[in-house]
Image (spheres, grey):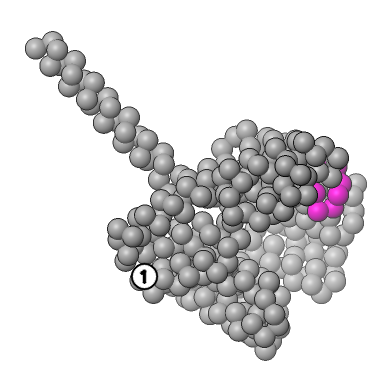
Amino acid sequence: MKRIRWFQFFAAAVLLSSARLAVAESPESLLAEGKADAAIAALTQRIAASPNDAEAQTLLCRAYYSIQDWDHSIAAGEKAVQLAPNKSNYHLWLGRAYGEKADSSSFFTAAGLARKVRTSFERAVELDGSNVAARSDLAEFYSEAPGIVGGGVDKARAQADALMKIAPAKAHWVLGRLAEKNKDNTTAEREYQAALDARHADADGWLDMVIFYRKAGRMNDLDNAIKKLGAAPLSSPEVLMDAAANLLRANHSLPQAAELLKRYLSGKTVEDGPAFKAHSLLGQVYEKQGDQKAAAAEFRAALALASGFRPAREGLKRTGG
């Protein structure tokens, strides 16, 4: 009897361990861990077994989006909305994929894609008016796109008005972007400060200030905002990576950028800040600092997670890794 009980206990433990492993290696977990290759492989297998799995298709759209493979991202996104046309977030991700593809296309191709971006974002908002990401992406589209493809400042302001009721911080962010576009930096800074206040001075709010100061060339204010961001409550871990990316773009305070990236990678990573992208950014920081060996190691770390990530491939080629 004792042997049977021990065998049953052992079998139950194995099953429990296997279940935990399965959960840990779900496509969602793989995306959060920045394991793009593994996520794409798992999702491709899942879709082969169940071609009408709309959730798998939108996850595949997001996985390809993360590695900047816009064509495959669009194909999966279109399949997702075809299978489940009433899912707001499916239209949102498809619109994002169209937008990135448009940014790297010729003028005429981009114009056609821009219309698809608008249609996708508008449909996402129509399906769920409380979808803050969809409303803010639509507002950004309206503010940046020319009227010929459906852009317009008044339309962007209308989205800001709607956001003010459900996400005031994001509404102020939209108004700040509109003011910047109008070259009114005084109003823009006031709106970003209002967004920061609405967020109770968390790291996300300070990131808006970081981006504004970088674009305005106010390096002393940028340094102060980075310091505040590093000490602020962190609801979105990827903010650390985004802050480092802004320092890298400004070629400013590179040691601080490296510290932010290492801090991010040492903790819990998320889909919005893929680990492979953080490694690639850290590689670029080391490269700018003249440490080719460390840079190549980071680019290899990125490619181990996402072999198709072009910035890391190009970085490794530059550093002779």
Vertical comparison of 290 with 102: above or below: above
Amino acid under disc 1: Ala
Specify the quadrant that holds the N terminus. Answer: top left
Q: Is residue 204 visible?
A: no
Which percent across, then down, holds residue 43?
41, 55
Using the rendered view, name the quadrant where residue 258 is placed. Answer: top right
Seen from the viewer's position, the closer of residues 291 and 113 is 291
Residue position for label 1? 84
Crowd around label 1: few <14 · some 14–19 · many ≥20 (10 Å): some
**In this view, which residue lies farthest toward the bottom?**
148
Which percent across, then down, holds residue 28?
44, 49
Specify the quadrant that holds the C terminus. Answer: top right
Using the rendered view, name the quadrant where residue 275 is placed. Answer: top right
Q: Residue at x 40, y 45 (%)?
A: 26
Vertical comparison of 315 with 52: above or below: above
Span highlighted in magenta in the image: 248-254
